[in-house]
Amino acid sequence: MNELRTTNQPLYNKFKRYAKLLLKPEEDLEAFEYRKVALFKEWKTQKGIVKYILDQDDSLNDAYQYINQLRFKLKHNDYEGFIHELKHMPLSQAHSFVQRAIKTLNKHAYFIKNTFDYYNLSNGPLEGINNKIKLIKRISFGYGSYNHLRNRILLCSKLYAPKSKKEVKQCLVA
C-alpha cells in the first residue's frame, strides 16, 4: 500500500480511509443504504466501497475472501471446513502476513478444535475477577504486605465465604 503513496495518491487515500471496512465481516457490511462518501464522486454502500478497493489489488482480494471464509466457518462452528480451508490455502500466493497467520493456526489446530467443541465456555468470569483485582490495586495506593493485598481481594471477592444453608424455621405439624 505504501508504494501507492507516490504513484497513485487518490487510490492510496481511499485505501487508507476505508481500511477499517476491510476488517468487518462481509455479511456485516451495509449493502442497501447508499450514502455520499468522501473520496468518491458517486453515492456508495459499504459493500460497494469494499468491492472497489478489492478490485484494485488481486492479492488483497484473495486474502480478504480467504479470511472471510475462515471467519464464516468459525462463526458457524464448522471445524472440518475450517481445517480444510487452512490446509488447502496455497501459501505461495498469500501475503506474508497471511502466511504467518495460517502457519500459526495450523500449529495450534488442536487447541482451535477445543474452541469449536466448547463454544459455550467463556473466560468472562475470570476477566471479571482480574478486573476487580486491578481495581483494588489501583485504589489501594500500594499495600506494604502481600498478605494484606491478598486478604483485601478475598474480602472484596467473597471468595472466603462458606456456603450457608437456609434452615426452615417452621414448626413441624403432625
Image (cartoon, rainbow, N blue to C red):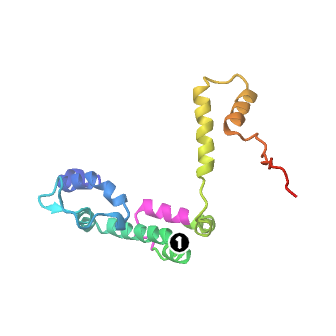
Tell me if residue 171 is in the magenta stretch: no
**In the structure shown, which secondary structural element does the residue marked by tag 1 occupy?**
loop
Percent position of residue 55, x then y: 25, 68
How many C-alpha atoms fall within 10 Å of the one at disc 1: few (<14), some, or many (≥20)? some
Percent position of residue 56, x then y: 24, 65
Residue occupying the point 27% across, 65% down:
47
Which region of the structure is painted magenta? 90-105
Residue occupying the point 31% across, 63% down:
29
Residue, far front: 174
Percent position of residue 11, x then y: 20, 56
Residue occupying the point 38% across, 67% down:
63
Quarter of the picture holding the N terminus: bottom left
Residue occupying the point 28% across, 66% down:
54
> Vertically, is 168 above or below 138?
below
Percent position of residue 27, x then y: 36, 68
Q: Amino acid at mark 1?
A: Asn
> Vertically, is 161 above or below 78?
above
Q: Nearer the viewer, residue 74 or 168?
A: 168
Q: Determine which residue is flagged by label 1.
A: 77
- The secondary structure that most of the magenta stretch takes on is helix
Quarter of the picture holding the C terminus: bottom right
Q: Relative to residue 34, is residue 145 drawn left or right?
A: right
Residue 92's image quarter? bottom left
Q: Relative to residue 146, is residue 38 drawn left or right?
A: left
Number of marks in picture: 1
